Amino acid sequence: NAGVTQTPKFQVLKTGQSMTLQCAQDMNHEYMSWYRQDPGMGLRLIHYSVGAGITDQGEVPNGYNVSRSTTEDFPLRLLSAAPSQTSVYFCASSATSGGRTQYFGPGTRLTVL
Amino acid sequence: EDQVTQSPEALRLQEGESSSLNCSYTVSGLRGLFWYRQDPGKGPEFLFTLYSAGEEKEKERLKATLTKKESFLHITAPKPEDSATYLCAVQASSFAGGTSYGKLTFGQGTILTVHP
């Protein structure tokens, strides 16, 4: 199993550009989520999904869109990038029953100029 | 609102010098407390889950304990390879679309540096 994979690993955008961060998991997990990690702020939840077709907002959703058309994939879209979105983004997945341990991907480091 | 506070923010130890990291929390309906290890440039790596007060779990030089208000991560005779950021998170039950899931709230982490 590859676990949780994320692409790209690094990305530089200009203000106003759009892009999609990709996340995939091969563990058949129902729950998937996106976090951003900023110095001194800890990991903050952006959006999450409990299954295909079901998404909801987390703590810091503004400026981001998500969709979940398959169990495996959960892309994060930045519609019009802003410097405040410079951060490291992590995708995570877990089962929705049992221990519910969330497993994280390797991250995408995004810089918005 | 669920809250997690980790202390200290940074900890420097000599190799072999045992110590503890603290995670204080407030949560409505704790389903689990998680410890993760994060190396620079990497994603968080799962270490432990604790479910109830009094529970303890061990892995190599690490031992996690849980009370009703806080958790400790004890590091015994640390080695330089234990240097990392240690993250604590609490999980509460939440529901979306008729499905229960585990919502995680993270602390800011403790940066551990172990010098040879």
Image: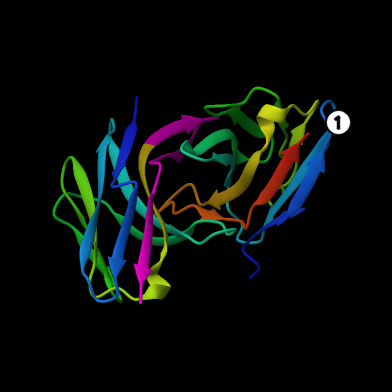
The magenta stretch spans which residues? B93-116
* Rendering coords of residue B11 (x, y %): 31, 56
Neighbours of disc 1 within 10 Å: few (<14), some (14-19), many (20+): few
Image-based side of A67 in relation to B5, left or right: right
Q: Amino acid at mark 1?
A: Gln
Residue on which the image places disc 1: A17
Image-based side of A91 in relation to B77, left or right: right
Decide if residue A74 is in sight here.
no
* Rendering coords of residue A67 (x, y %): 73, 35
User: Tell me, what colour scheme is on the image?
Assistant: rainbow
Residue displayed at 72% across by 43% down: A110
Main SS type for the magenta part? strand
Image-based side of A83 in relation to A27, left or right: right
Residue displayed at 71% across by 29% down: A83
Q: Is residue B86 magenta?
A: no
Q: Is residue B108 magenta?
A: yes
* Rendering coords of residue A13 (x, y %): 82, 38
Q: Quadrant of the C terminus of chain A?
A: top right
* Rendering coords of residue B108 (x, y %): 40, 42
Decide if residue A46 is in sight here.
yes
Residue displayed at 50% across by 56% down: B44
